[in-house]
Image (spheres, rainbow, N blue to C red):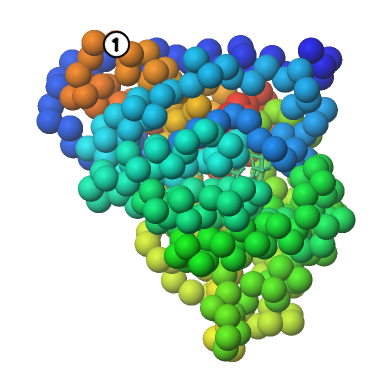
Amino acid sequence: MNDSVIPLVDARNALKIGGCSSIATTAEAVDTRGRRLRDLRISVTDRCNFRCIYCMPKTVFGRDYPFLQHKELLSFEEIARAARIFVSLGVSKIRLTGGEPLLRRDIERLIEMLAVIPGLELTLTTNGSLLTRKAQTLRDAGLQRVTVSLDALDDETFRKMNDVDYPVSQVLEGIAAAEAAGLMPIKINMVVKHGTNDHAILPMARHFRSTPSNPGHIVRFIEYMDVGSSNGWKLDEVLPSAKVVERISSEMPLLPIDPNYSGEVAERWRYADGSGEIGVISSVTQAFCSSCTRLRLSTDGSLYTCLFADRGHDLRSLLRSSQSDQEIGASLGSLWAKRTDNYSEQRSAATAAQRKIEMSYIGG
Ligand code: SAM
Ligand code: SF4
Ligand code: SF4
């Protein structure tokens, strides 16, 4: 194994989920700060064909990295069962993610199983590399929308960010295929790393804004975060979202707009001339923990109540026990009820250096 490999296997030792004495009919889960459980992010693989420097740097995620073995993964049937239980607790949106979710074999079969759950919004986040091939089958399976990550429009900068040789043009083709398949509206995620790709902010904004002949797409500029323990995060590599808005606005004036719903992660801005909108996600400079309704399910079935957690809770054992859906639902409801997480409100140099679980494992 590479010397710099962080022994994540230790961090993967999930805590047992305690039972719940009252098996009341499942009701909407609310945590200690009054936050409801609304969004579930499901990581379907911890593997990826990119090695983004802020997520899976090659020095750590090298050839010998101990990725999960197939037998450790939750099966599609287990994921779909968990999803149904979570919907009974209030979840109304599921995002499939990873790792690169389109690398999970037969992902369309999972989408078919989730798409029939009533009242669920079903989306997926991808690096776009397999989208040209898969957009139509994903749509046919019942996927509603996609978010595509893209950190620059020029190959040189794109490569500096993802550390593989993959042309931007193929991601753009994937976005066009998603559009043609009706996976709309498409959002484009750009992680901004100050000094590496911040010069790409304006080209990205220009490229994706709408024109009379093209509806455009919503780019969301994301502050580089101290997720995981492998990316060597430093505060001076974060470009505050306020600066992103300032830079874009100096060329293409922006006006703030109301969120689509309470607790929306991205702060929305529209172009004053009517050519669409952008979003900024400011986890570092403007914590949004007070309205965080997200829960993450790792590829091997551990639950994380915060993106910056160091330990998960073992749902896989519950799913493989003789417990009924109602019993599992009651335990999950009480797990959420005890939730206190607010990492971004407490972030400091010390917390940034703490051991945290990797984003590729629990899902972005
Ligand atoms: N592989 C897919 C992709 O890249 O879209 C899905 C998984 S990825 C972990 C999900 C999102 O997390 C991506 O938009 C990615 O850019 C973002 N992300 C990963 N590491 C990040 C970091 N350190 N700071 C901010 N965003 C990050
Ligand atoms: Fe892969 Fe997505 Fe992480 Fe990049 S951000 S390494 S594409 S999982
Ligand atoms: Fe939610 Fe944790 Fe992020 Fe705060 S730091 S918004 S609690 S995931």
The answer to whether 52 appears left or right of 341 in the picture is right
- Number of marks in the rendered image: 1
For image coordinates 61% across by 48% down, the residue present is: 130
Q: Nearer the viewer, residue 65 or 284?
A: 65
Q: Nearer the viewer, residue 220 or 63?
A: 63
Q: Position of residue 186 (x, y in %)?
A: 52, 63
Q: Position of residue 173 (x, y in %)?
A: 65, 62
Q: Nearer the viewer, residue 352 or 125?
A: 125
> Can residue 157 be seen?
yes
Question: In which quadrant will I find the C terminus?
Answer: top right
For image coordinates 12% across by 27% down, the residue present is: 24
The answer to whether 40 appears left or right of 53 in the picture is left
Residue at the left extreme?
25
User: Residue 154 falls in which quadrant of the image?
Assistant: bottom right
User: Residue 198 falls in which quadrant of the image?
Assistant: bottom right
Q: Residues within 10 Å of mark 1 (few under 14, many from 20)?
A: few
Query: Hey, what amino acid is under mark 1?
Result: Ser
Image position of 87 with respect to 153: above or below: above
Question: In which quadrant will I find the N terminus?
Answer: top right
Mark 1 sits near ligand 3, with its Cβ under 8 Å away:
no
Image position of 149 with respect to 293: above or below: below
**Secondary element type, mark 1:** loop
For image coordinates 25% across by 51% down, the residue present is: 119
Q: Position of residue 181 (x, y in %)?
A: 47, 63
Split into quadrants, the picture shows ligand 1 in the one at top right
The answer to whether 107 appears left or right of 172 in the picture is left
> Can residue 364 be seen?
no
Q: Residue tagged by mark 1?
A: 321
Q: Nearer the viewer, residue 46 or 235?
A: 46
